[in-house]
Amino acid sequence: MMIATIRRFYPAFYQEYGSLIWIATICLTFPLFVRGLNSRLYGKEKKYWSWYGNHFAAVNSMYVILSSILPVVTQMSTLLFGAR
C-alpha cells in the first residue's frame, strides 16, 4: 500500500529508488516469516523438535542470520535512515 502511494505521488523518486524499496521490503519481511514459521513448527511438530535438536548449531546459525542480521544490514544499506 505504501509503495503504491509512493509510486503514485512521487513518480520520480519511485523511478530512481523503486528497486531498493522493493528489495528492502522483501528483506525486512522475510525474517518475520522465518520467526513465525520456526515458532509454529517448534510448538506443534514432534518431527521438527527432533530434527531441530539434531541440527541445532546449523539451524540456530541460519536463524540468527536470517532473523537478526539480515534486517539490520538491509536497513542500513537502503535509504531508510536517510543517508545517501
Image (cartoon, helix red, strand yellow):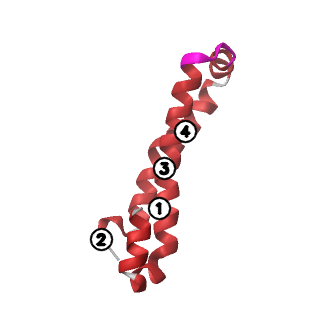
Q: Earlier in the sequence, mark 3 or mark 4?
A: 3
Q: Nearer the viewer, mark 2 or mark 4?
A: 4
Please report the bounds of the magenta region as a residue range.
Answer: 43-47
Most frequent secondary structure within the magenta stretch: helix
- The picture places residue 9, in percent across and down from the top left corner, at 35, 79
Give the SS element for disc 3: helix
Q: Residue at x 53, y 48 (%)?
A: 30
Q: Residue at x 69, y 16 (%)?
A: 47
Residue under label 4, please give it: 34
Q: Earlier in the sequence, mark 3 or mark 1?
A: 1
Rounded to the nearest whole Å, what is the CA distance between mark 2 and mark 4?
27 Å
Label ID, residue 2: none
Q: Earlier in the sequence, mark 2 or mark 4?
A: 4
Residue under label 2, please give it: 82
Q: Are marks 3 and 1 in contact (CB under 8 Å)?
A: no
Between 78 and 30, the one lying in front of the other is: 30
Rounded to the nearest whole Å, what is the CA distance between mark 3 and mark 1?
8 Å
Give yes or no for residue 64 being in the magenta stretch.
Answer: no
- The picture places residue 65, in percent across and down from the top left corner, at 52, 43
Q: Nearer the viewer, mark 2 or mark 3?
A: 3
Label ID, residue 29: 3
